[in-house]
Image: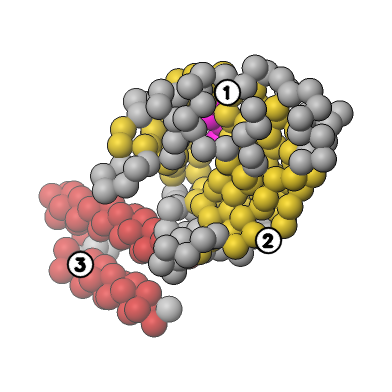
Amino acid sequence: MRTFLKQWWQILVVGSVLTSVTGVSLATFASDPLKANIALGAFLLFLIFLGWRAQRTFDQVLGKTYPRGYETLSTFVRYSTSDGNNIQYETFRHIQNKVLVRDHMEHQFLWTGSKPPKITSCLQTIGDSQPVVGTAKSKVRVNFKKPILFNEVEVVHLRMEIDDSDHTSETYVGLLVREPTKAITFKVELLHVKQKYNGAYAKVLRNDIDKNNGNPPLEIDSVKFDIVSKSFEYILANPTPGYRYSLEWERKA
C-alpha cells in the first residue's frame, strides 16, 4: 500500500509540474491559441499516461492475489463413456475476471492415453493444442466471443472427445487448485457397465503440488459407485489451495 501511494504521489507531482510549465490557464486559452493547443496536447498526453499507469498499477496489485488474473468460483468435471472405449470429458468452470479486460484464458491439461483428444466448446472458440514446455501437459487457448470486464463472470466450457479403445489411459480425473474456490464436482459415468462395479468405491486423493517430493497422494475420502446412474459423483466444498485433487477408480475387465 505504501508503494502504491508513493507511485500515485509521483504521478500527481508530474501532472502539477506539467500544467505549470505549459501554462494551462484560462488567460492562456483566451490570449494565445498556439500556447493553448500545446498545453491542451500536453494535458491530453498526461491523461493518456495516467490511464496507462492506472491500469499497470491496478494489474500489479491484483496480480499478487490472483496470479492468473481470475478467480475460479466453482468447477464441474464430467467424464462419460457409453462403451468403455470412447470418452467424452467436459469441464464447466465459473470464473470471475480480475483484470481490467479479458478476451481469453489458457487451459492446461494432462491426457495419459495414446491418442490426442479433439477439443471443442459450446461457449467459446478453441485454439490449437500445444505442449507445455518442460512438462507432460498440453495447453489450449480459450477465446471468449465477447471480452469481459473487471469482476464480470464467465462460464468457460471445454469438451474433449477421446478414443481410448486401447485402454492405455489412467482411470482418474483431477484438478489443480491454486487459489480459493467454492466447490469442485467430479462426475464419472461408466454407462456401459452392468454389475461388475456394484459395491465398488473410488478414491478421492489430494496431492501437494509443491512439496510432494515423490510421496504418494493422500486418500482423503471415498465414494461408492451408484449402480442406478452408473456413476461416481463427489462434491468437494472449499478445497484447500496448493493441492491437486483427483477421483480415481479401478478399470475392471
State how many labels appear: 3
* Disc number lying in front (1 or 3): 1
Taking depth in this image into account, of 137 and 144 the one nearest to the observer is 137
Name the residue that disc number 3 marks. Answer: 18
Local secondary structure at mark 2 = strand
Q: Please name the residue shown 57% across and 19% down the image.
A: 85
Q: Which residues are magenta?
A: 155-159
Give the image quarter of residue 3: bottom left
State how far apart marks 1 and 2 are (Cα). Answer: 26 Å
Name the residue that disc number 2 marks. Answer: 220
Give the image quarter of residue 118: top left
Q: Are marks 1 and 2 in contact (CB under 8 Å)?
A: no
| Most common secondary structure along the magenta stretch | strand
* Left or right for 67, reference 185: left
Given the current orientation, which residue lies at the most extreme left position? 34
Residue 166 to residue 215: above or below: above
Given the current orientation, which residue lies at the most extreme front position? 253
Quarter containing the N terminus = bottom left
Crowd around label 2: few <14 · some 14–19 · many ≥20 (10 Å): few
Taking depth in this image into account, of 64 and 221 the one nearest to the observer is 221
Q: Please name the residue shown 37% across and 74% down the image.
A: 4
**In magenta stretch: residue 33:** no
